Amino acid sequence: MSAVHQLTGAGQPYRVSPPVVLTDEELARCGGRLPVWADPVALADETEADRVRERRLYVGLAAAITVVVLLYLVRVLVLAG
Amino acid sequence: MTDVLVVLLLVLVGIGAIPVVAGLAQFLVIPLHAVRNHYRETGPYLPNVAVVIPAWNEAAVLPMSIERLMSLDYPPQRLRVYVVDDASTDDTPAVLAACAARHPGRVVHLRRDKGGEGKAHTLNHGLREILADDWMEALLIMDADVIYEPVSLRKMTRHLADPTVGAVTAYIREGSRDPKGMTRFIGFDYLAAQAASRRAQNVAGAMACLAGGAQLHTRENLLAIGGQIDTSSLAEDTVTTFRTQLAGRRVVFEPHARVLAEEPAGVDALWKQRLRWARGNVQITSMYRHLFFRRSVHPGLGGIFFGIFWFAILLLPVAMVLTSVGLIGLYLLDSDLAGSVFGAAVFVPIATFVFMITLTISVDPPTGRKVWREALLFPGAISFVVLLTAAFPGVVPLSGAAETAWTLFVYSWLVLCIPLAYGVRRLELSRWGRPLAPLALYLVGFGPMMCAITVDAYVKEFRGAAMTWDKTEKTGRVAA
């Protein structure tokens, strides 16, 4: 069963689940490679990649601002003409 | 007297503009999700997950969705699927028997002898069975047609490592193999309403609704909200979401847990589905009327951002009418003033439109590339032309009666588009008009159709119409 832990020094309590132990047979079924869910470091890397991927929102913001500014400038030019 | 009337009409235009300004604010908030998200509080948490699927005559879609669940990239011994068969009359029992035989102990068939009471009752039947056993640590509620990407479940469970989180929802995408017309519009709508808007709600710290097809709850949360799903409204997902947050737990949206769902392919089917959602929202507004704009009740749900966001959607048709009435009234009193007000204000909806399209597409570029035309035509081709001519006045030279007629058309279009959207539905239901309905949809737009459905929801709620559960027909169109 999972448990909620309060570790001294940690920023907050956190839930942990028991480690997943793969038998040789299960490992063979996975092609001899440890699945991501059986490796806490790989899981942490996956989360970090998703966190960094969120930065593409800045690209969307920059594109939106650029388009709005361009539209505004064209509008000003049209109105001035 | 005229001055008072002018001020009153200006106030109407100002009030009518609130949803547009709220929309712009929401899209400005979305980029903050790059820094204000829940990833730093996650952990490698893989609880025992019970998946509950309510099913009524879902034989066409269940084999695929169950097989995809069984092949999720998640510890197999920590995943069980419970399908609650709501007295199906098709091959659902036989299909489930075959699935249970293929995956002994991992797929459980729960059969209700008497069905037809709706999704919430069906879910509650499953919840009673699942909660009777202490194996389940987290419960995933999903729909029978939903297909989970292999990594999606573990990307959701990682947020439950934080004990303050009660529930997590995923990003549902329209998943047709060959999207056309309506399903493309829904593709963009889901991109905007789920992938983009729910990021803003993550930032604001208040979630409006857990996606019905992808909601993961901790056992503690389910027990804290009564161990049951609300059966008194048409928006049981929203009630669950509100109850979770009011019980002091967070609700998190995980944008990188992606699931595919089959959505309506026609106007009438969409209307029935969205009418259910819209009526549910009207009911929720009444149920939780004490909550909005009261931070003392809940800091997120009672916050100004959430309140404005909620009512901007719910009262959008009212705002459109107020804007139209205000502009037409001003035009009749003082056409120059009306022109000045419109000219000064029109860039706000244009900027909002640009932000909506650009930021929405940036959250999921592969889907955005497929639906960019529907993004541009979301408000309809007519509205798009109206916006263009408003942004660049003088490009189309008009004078005299033609100019007056065009101006009055532009000012009244915000109201006219609502009955026309209703007309698109009638067109699809008529034998001769059915082939023309897709063209009419592109002309009038998906956005006005949502407003027309909201108006229909007001009317149905006011008249106390029966709360029928019009199930969306599923055919298995979702790409594997």
Image (cartoon, coloured by chain):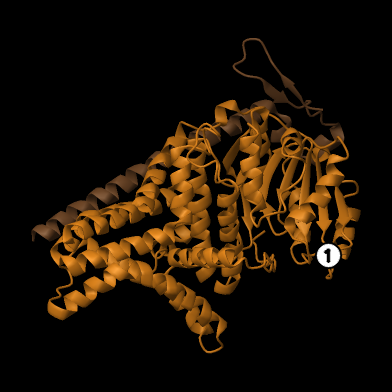
Q: Quarter-wise, where is residue B102 in the image?
A: bottom right
Seen at 62% across and 14% down, the residue is A10
Q: Quarter-wise, where is residue B6 in the image?
A: bottom left
Does the image show residue B362? yes
- Colour chain B appears in: orange
Q: Chain of mark 1?
A: B
Compared with A27, B328 (above or below) is below
The foreground one among B424 and B412 is B412
Seen at 67% across and 51% down, the residue is B236
Seen at 18% across and 66% down, the residue is B333
**Please, which residue is most extreme toward the front here?**
B1
Q: Circle 1 — which element?
A: helix
- Colour chain A appears in: brown
Q: Position of residue B418 (x, y in %)?
A: 43, 70
The residue indicated by pointer 1 is B92
Compared with B356, B330 (above or below) is below
Q: Does B415 sit left or right of B265 as displayed?
A: left
